[in-house]
Image: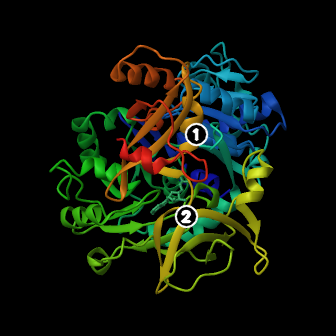
């Protein structure tokens, strides 16, 4: 696979692959540590190809685990620490891994071999568990076997990302090596910067696919990943210190992260003088943010991209011009990348005229194989295009096209984006009823302009709890933490005596909204 080839190529230089606070990882170390991890997998589990599940955040040693899995011909499943234990357990049950790398000692009961950071450290350094040198685990240094023949390639799955599922359980989206290779060749021109190699931001969690831009494209270009972790996001002083120190030339994030930085007057060209490009993906890029960035970073280009995880990160790109920024229309999501075909269709599946809204279908070799172990869901959302024979994906996004440019107009279903995270409303509702005294629940997103400001939940109690609304909300939120990551927990939780119903007999969310 291209990224593994490139790591090996740069391993002959002193170049840094990663800066993570005070820690660094050179390309040489990345190559050696990932070899050692691959050797461990191959020696311990032979030809077993089950995915490796990795629970952590931005730990330095995650990268060798990701590439080491690929080197051993296996997929990896990254799970960020925002995901609570109960959901991690569900994912592990689904994936049935042989190895679970747990950077946070979650203590989950599993048949998989659990690697703590300590044990992992020994494996990566080529030591056996008792600390003695284990030369078998260093295939390169000893040349005992040719690890390259195990490297992942073609249609083998490289990673599986778990995203919110409407049943209340996360659903897995596998992406193949070939899918990522397509994206790499399509995206390279957008990644050009004037400096040789340079520094790229490593802020997006590995369990969210936009991180692929850094860990596949950035690494393949020999760039240095500069890590921004969760703790930095919680301390603006520290965050700006790191942004200032990063020497970053390529910014990649959701608009939400940039919006978090904008309230500070320090967020400008003086802080990051070498910044040449902002690449956004994952949610609506607003006029407001574009205007701010144009003013504060006059030399930097702003690129908007769009895409669902199912079609490998992103399938459009466009550099935002002054004209687009001034246009009354929303900021466009871009032009389809080369070899990507878009079709916009009406509810009957018939193509609509240019300028008219409809559901966006993506037809491309970037479209992944379908949902993990969910043929029912795969059949609904994926198809093979009769004209081209390529795979297609029904995005559920309402879009229109004008002069070849595409514009996003919201979802056709109950999927939302909150702070850049993709969430199915039913996922929250189905987890709310797992709480002790809740019979039914309905969740609605509350908008501020184009973006969701917060979520509100209405709940029907099984029996009176004698609590005031504030205490009840705190109690429910506390329980919900066991099942859901914090960004999925509604800010407002209100108890109702009954749910208003619409003419179809469904909960009338419009009426609920008026009760806020
Ligand atoms: P994810 O799979 O998490 O990347 O989420 C994919 C969904 O995010 C898409 O189907 C869209 O609804 C939304 N999305 C992604 N990129 C953009 C964008 N540039 N503008 C608006 N919405 C976007």
Q: CA distance from mark 2 to mark 1?
A: 19 Å
Q: Residue at x 53, y 18 (%)?
A: 463
Q: Which residue is the site of mark 2?
A: 397
Q: Is residue 103 above or below residue 389?
A: above
Q: Position of residue 422 (x, y in %)?
A: 51, 48
- Name the quarter where the N terminus is drawn: bottom right
Callout 1 environment at 10 Å: few (<14), some (14 to 19), or many (20+)? many
Q: Residue at x 28, y 42 (%)?
A: 242
Nearer to us in this view, 251 or 507: 507
Confirm or reject: label 1 Cβ below 8 Å from ligand 1: no
Q: Can the viewer see residue 59?
A: no
Nearer to us in this view, 342 or 245: 342
Q: Is residue 440 above or below residue 462?
A: below
Location of residue 393 by image quarter: bottom right
Q: Could you say whether the residue bearing mark 1 is in a helix, strand or loop?
A: helix
Tell me how many marks there are. Answer: 2
- Left or right, 149 with reference to 341: right
- Left or right, 299 with reference to 283: left
Q: Which residue is the site of mark 1?
A: 427
Q: Residue at x 67, y 22 (%)?
A: 114
- Name the quarter where the C terminus is drawn: top left
Q: Position of residue 514 (x, y in %)?
A: 37, 47
Confirm or reject: label 2 Cβ below 8 Å from ligand 1: yes
Nearer to us in this view, 260 or 428: 428
């Amino acid at each position: 696979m291209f990224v593994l080839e490139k790591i090996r190529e740069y391993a002959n230089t002193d170049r840094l692959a990663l800066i993570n606070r005070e820690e660094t990882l050179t390309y040489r170390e990345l190559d050696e540590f990932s070899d050692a991890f691959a050797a461990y997998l191959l020696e311990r589990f032979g030809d077993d190809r089950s995915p490796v599940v990795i629970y952590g955040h931005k730990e330095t040693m995650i990268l060798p685990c990701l590439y080491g899995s690929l080197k051993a011909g296996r997929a990896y499943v990254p799970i960020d620490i925002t995901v609570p234990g109960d959901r991690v357990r569900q994912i592990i049950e689904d994936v049935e891994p042989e190895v679970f790398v747990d950077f946070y000692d979650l203590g989950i009961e599993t048949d998989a071999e659990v690697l703590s950071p300590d044990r992992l450290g020994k494996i990566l350094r080529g030591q056996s568990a008792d600390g003695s040198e284990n030369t078998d685990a260093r295939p390169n240094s000893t040349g005992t076997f040719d690890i390259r023949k195990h490297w992942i390639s073609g249609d083998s799955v490289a990673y599986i990302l778990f995203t919110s599922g409407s049943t209340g359980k996360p659903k897995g989206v596998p992406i193949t090596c070939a899918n990522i290779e397509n994206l790499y060749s399509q995206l390279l021109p957008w990644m050009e910067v004037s400096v040789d190699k340079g520094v790229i931001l490593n802020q997006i969690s590995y369990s969210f696919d936009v991180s692929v831009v850094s860990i596949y494209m950035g690494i393949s270009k020999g760039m240095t990943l500069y890590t921004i972790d969760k703790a930095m996001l919680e301390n603006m002083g520290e965050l700006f210190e790191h942004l200032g120190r990063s020497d970053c030339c390529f910014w990649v994030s959701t608009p939400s992260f940039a919006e978090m930085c904008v309230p500070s007057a320090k967020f400008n060209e003086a802080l990051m003088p070498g910044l040449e490009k902002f690449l956004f993906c994952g949610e609506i890029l607003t006029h407001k943010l574009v205007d701010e960035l144009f003013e504060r970073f006059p030399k930097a280009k702003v690129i908007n991209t769009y895409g669902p995880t199912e079609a490998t990160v992103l399938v459009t790109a466009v550099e935002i011009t002054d004209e687009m920024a001034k246009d009354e229309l929303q900021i466009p999501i871009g032009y389809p990348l080369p070899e990507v075909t878009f079709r916009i269709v009406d509810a009957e599946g018939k193509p609509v005229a240019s300028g008219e809204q409809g559901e966006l279908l993506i037809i491309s070799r970037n479209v992944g194989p379908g949902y993990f172990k969910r043929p029912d869901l795969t059949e609904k959302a994926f198809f093979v295009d009769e004209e081209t024979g390529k795979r297609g994906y029904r995005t559920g996004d309402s879009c229109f096209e004008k002069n070849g440019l595409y514009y996003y107009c919201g979802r056709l279903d109950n999927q939302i984006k909150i702070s850049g995270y993709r969430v199915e409303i039913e996922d929250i509702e189905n987890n709310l009823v797992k709480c002790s005294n809740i019979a039914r629940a309905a969740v609605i997103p509350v908008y501020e302009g184009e973006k969701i400001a917060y979520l509100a939940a209405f709940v029907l109690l099984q029996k009176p709890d004698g609590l005031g609304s504030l205490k009840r909300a705190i109690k429910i939120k506390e329980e919900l933490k066991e099942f859901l990551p914090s960004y999925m927990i509604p800010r407002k939780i209100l108890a109702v005596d009954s749910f208003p119903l619409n003419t179809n007999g469904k909960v009338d969310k419009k009426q609920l909204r008026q009760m806020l």
